[in-house]
Image: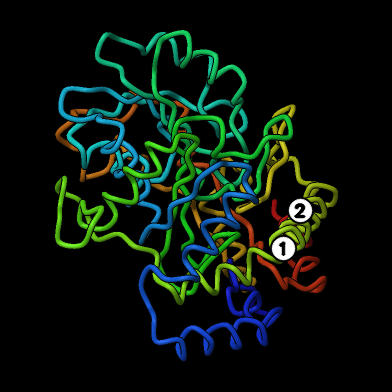
Amino acid sequence: MKIMPNRMDRGFYQYQQEFEEKALEVLRSGWYVLGKEVSAFEKEFAAYTGAPYCIGLASGLDALWLAFRVLGIGPGDEVIVQANTYIASVMGITINGAVPVFVEPDAHFGIDVDRIEEKITERTKAVLVVHLYGMPCHMGRITGLCKKHGLYLVEDCAQSHGACFDGQMTGTFGDVGCFSFYPSKNLGAFGDGGAVVVKEEALDKAFRMYRNYGSEKRYYNKVVGANSRLDELQAGLLRVRLKHLDEITQERIAIADTYTSHLKNPLIKLPVLAEHTTGVWHQYVIRCEERDRLLSYLEEKGIGTIIHYPIPPHLSEAYQSFGYQKGDLPVTEHLADTVLSLPLYNGMTEEELDCVIRAVNEFC
């Protein structure tokens, strides 16, 4: 049996008829950009998260860099961010000319709240938290720190659609919640897509202007904006999946619970959610000191895995100019050397799940 690390086709087949009907409806409408599907999705996703406003964008990266652009963060400013994130989080900062200030992660893959305050300087303008792998950060303490120091709070929710801290959904704690709808996400489109959720009407208007060439009225441009619009087809298909997101999430939670209950190998460290959090298990990320040997072993057995992520942003070639060296962020670097994501996808069969568990437990 060959088991892929992810299977997006299974998620399509679960709701195939609804997806196909919606696709034809949009195609036959003759309206493909900023129409009724986008407006409807924005209202429905805002209601789902509990945020007053949602603005559909072209990608999760656009959500991130536009967040800092709209908040007025630019050259010379600093943004505190966890070091173990995907590089897109950091690109959202540096595209605007701002400087990322890296903080090590805690035991739950989120930013270590105890290390944030020591990084704050007079140039610090914001904190960017990343709810990595669908595991929420400790938002209570983080919001308190941001209020204390007068900092903006931006949330990278690319992997945490529906995840909660103390019953409140990620994306709604800070000034801007940034979402990706890349096909592999829990709420995935069938192409690129993204969105931000905000609380203030002024931010809602600003994002709508920036996403459409900086224009509030056609051909009248107030700022140098972007072409970053969630298209009608993707919005329509996202509306279909959003209707089923709770059941999609419950299925992923059940798979993760099965892993947690049945994986019994002293060489493997399992992920643990922090107190007061409800995770959505975008990834099930284990740790192993002999990760590379485990990866090869599972590959020989036909089980695909992914490393999220093998090279931390501070050591990437793209950010050599920052001058970081190996050893500067040891916790982050150790995670990069030991993490491994096991197969987890909607439509995963019991046979596939049992096969992965048996193989991991037999690794020695």
Measured from the top left, where is residue 214 in percent x and y?
A: 21, 51
* Position above or below: 222 against 244: above
Q: Quarter of the image holding residue 153?
A: top left
Classify residue 244 as left or right of residue 141. right
Question: What label sits on residue 62 in the rendered view?
Answer: none
Q: Secondary structure at mark 1?
A: helix
Q: Quarter of the image holding residue 350?
A: bottom right
Q: Nearer the viewer, residue 357 or 69?
A: 69
Question: Which badge, 1 or 2, is on the more N-terminal residue?
Answer: 1
Question: What label sits on residue 248 in the rendered view?
Answer: 1
* Position above or below: 120 against 155: above
Residue hosting label 2: 253
Classify residue 21 as left or right of residue 149. right
* Position above or below: 51 against 255: above
| Residue at the image point whose x is 47% and y is 39% from the top | 198
| Residue at the image point whose x is 68% and y is 32% from the top | 165
Q: Quarter of the image holding residue 35?
A: bottom left
Crowdedness near tag 1: few (<14), some (14–19) or many (≥20) residues, C-alpha within 10 Å: many
Measured from the top left, where is residue 334 in percent x and y?
A: 47, 33
- Distance from disc 1 to disc 2, alpha carbons, whole Å, reads 9 Å
